[in-house]
Image (tube, grey):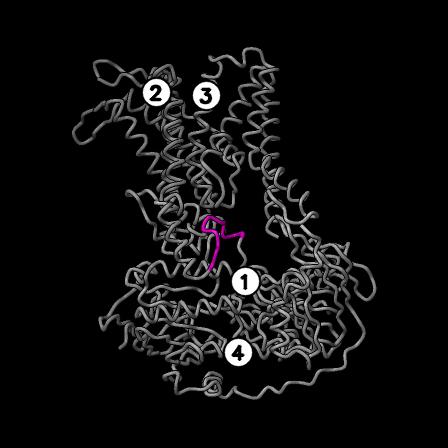
Amino acid sequence: MTATTSTAAPIAANGGWLALVLKLRALIALGVVLAFFSVMAPNFLSTANFLIMFKHVAITAILAIGMSFVILTGGIDLSVGSIAGLGGMVAGALILNGLTIAPLGVVVYPSIPMVIAIVLLLGGLAGFANGVLVSRFKVAPFIATLGMLYVARGAAMLLSNGATFPNLTGREDLGNTGFPWLGAGTVLGLPVTVLVMGVIALVAAFVARDTPFGRRVYAVGGNERAALLSGVRVDRVKIAVYVISGVCAALVGLVVSSELVAAHPASGETFELSAIAAVVLGGASLSGGRGTVGGALIGACVIGVLGDGLVMMGVSEFWQMVVKGLVIIAAVVLDQLQGRLAAAGKA
Amino acid sequence: MSLLRAEQVGKTYGGVVALDGVDFDVRAGAVNVLIGENGAGKSTLMKILAGVEQPSSGRLLLDGQPVRFASIREAAAAGVGIVFQELNLCPNLTVTENIFLGRDLTSAPGVSDKAAERKRAREILARLAHDIDPDAQVGTLRIGEQQIVEIAKALVDDARVLILDEPTSALSTAEVEVLFRVIGELKQAGVGVIYISHRLEELMRIGDYVTVLRDGRLIDSKPASEVSVAWIIAQMLGDKARDRPRTAARQAGEIVLSVEALSLPRAGGGLLLDNVSASFRAGEITALYGLLGSGRTEFLESIYGARPAKGSVKLNGEEISHLPLAERCRRRIRFVPEDRQRDGLFHNLSVGGNLGLSRLIAFAKAGVIDGGRERSAIGEMMARLGVKAASPQIAIGALSGGNQQKVVIGRGLMTGPLVMLLDEPSRGVDIGARGEVFDTMRALADQGMAVVFATSDLLEAQAVADRVLVMAAGRLTADLPLEAATEAALVAACNPIEAPRNMEPAQ
């Protein structure tokens, strides 16, 4: 940057450099984490390990992408882990037990694409409920989605009385085989899960950046009243972001149960926290209006790589939690620093 | 011919009548001026016309046909646009994104056409004679620039009726001229402009029809050619109209506050404050006159410790420039910010809560607030400043701009300050209440306080102050006693010729 006076030049130069580092902190953090584990953990740099790691990252990333829309409006979605758990259980129930249509007394076994569609629809409905509570009934997002967290988890438990649905391979004669492909299959050598994540990330980034809807999401988070007075249907925007988050959560439920070829009702617990952490690491502001899909993706990579790397180094699970917590706190502190720097720049 | 007509429109908020059967005609190709004190019902009427609120009674006619605007979108679709008095922009979005928010241009269904939007935004800004970068984040713009963006937002719709609610409150003289030219163009194009302002000379200049509201009722409506400023004031104030004689400048006391060589760097190079020195005496009202961006706000905020300025600030001889804001507060300097809604008020607290906040420690006994003591102090302050509120318990948002301003001033007064710094104290305050705010400032000075207020209103500077400082481009360009503070002198000081620049080191 060119500075016009000699006194201001060093300040501006320093500020510019520091600002850039802070802005790219998620990417830098990812680089540091990767470099660290490359040295510390043998086999970390292998292709096989990266494929495994990316499958783990995909789960957090899909949730984080959905979550980032919610957080951009200034909301939060605590229910995604539970919705993922419920989604997996519904898929399991549909594959193993089919759908009983009571008045006819028949049991229908939907095909796998149908199962996926039903589960995604269900996730969307749960998100819709969150959105209606938040926008129409003015329930604080934290509370509305906390309620949904319990409701969805309880429903998941009720489906099997707390038991696991095992062996979700389906049966030839029922025409519902192929479920494990989602979690274990590959296309052109890449895991399906990772491809799904990639597609979702591209679509989400496009929606956030290049569509009127995306802009309205940012507007609602930036100044809700201004958005309202500009003719934005704020209620619809809010409902839509929770629907997006719910669908992403249900998708994660499908991926996880497909990978395990089994659905466990407790699956997805604390996933919401990783997702929120990823979004924040990616530079989003919890008060809304600031953040990107790309950032959330990088944040998810940091969280995923950190987890897997620590496991490979043989660090205990308890220490892993401590480290993750510290990283999240550091991210928010840096975020504040960046904000202060930006404010100073304005002054 | 009436383009949009309000017929016997009434509005009641929970039993309180805000509008009482008002008729209002918006004529095409004319500037329809609406005046009245704050609380007269202007804003309510505007909100009804723009679809933000629905009338409790009466009806709207567009081209003679009854219409109902259920939302601001419906009104916009019918061609009624509005620029709100309070800025309604998303600080995290760019200028272009704000202008097209809710009215996106798309290249394919559901895909924003950013290039087209940017091009159109540039055109509109050019029409407003502004070189604001369409890609700049709105949060980084000055308030005056943000106001231009607000106006640009309304222009993009090709509205047939355009409501401008105090559009000039944050604009400089040059920017006001541009706005008036644009209003002239809109008139030519047959747009019915509704114009609300407290600046009477503006209304007289551009108004074609004048409608006066008072206490929610229509008082009178006439062509502008048939009215005078005196008539407007009489209609607005009713029985409240009275002369406000200018009190003679008092003998100023000792120097209370002195500032020396205050400088504040601008991010990205240059200076917001450039070596500013001045001193302020007890019992003296000093106006800090300057246009937008002259550094007047930065100067006051630096004295208060809200900005990291270099230089010396002395209060009664004691150096305080190294002290943080809270310490300066404790040494009894008080500041009333320009943006009252954002920086001055706690919207979650009542009138009393807003007033008492600065004195909670004094109200406390052993760490517990003594409600009785707090109530009596608040009551006294409300009486002293003449705050018009039914009780200290009502919400701060229910008060008019003038009364809210008194509450912010009163909060400062609770601590018995030595120096009172006020940034644009009359912004968003109607004329009647403006006088009261200025009377309050005079009374404070008479009690021995040093009062400094920033203003961009020439007449205000002349009418209220004992002494006028002029700022331009971060420098103090004039320090004039009232007698010398003529219009010509002030304007000249605002436009310093190249001379001072030569003092800068060669680049």
Frontmost residue, A334 versus A96: A334
Q: Residue at x 55, y 76 (%)?
A: B388
Q: Is residue B283 magenta?
A: no
| Residue at the disc numbered 4 | B431
Label 1 resides on the chain identified as B
Q: Are marks 3 and 2 on the same chain?
A: yes
| Residue at the disc numbered 3 | A54
Relative vertical location of residue B218 with respect to residue B479 in this rendering, above or below: below
Q: Is residue A103 left or right of residue B142?
A: left
Q: Position of residue A227 (x, y in %)?
A: 41, 53
| Residue at the disc numbered 1 | B341
Q: Are marks 3 and 1 on the same chain?
A: no
Rounded to the nearest angstrom, the CA distance separating label 1 from label 4 is: 19 Å
Q: Which residues are magenta?
A: B130-140
Q: Are marks 3 and 4 on the same chain?
A: no
Q: Are marks 1 and 2 on the same chain?
A: no
Q: Residue lying furthest right in this view? A: B317
Q: Main secondary structure of the magenta part?
A: loop
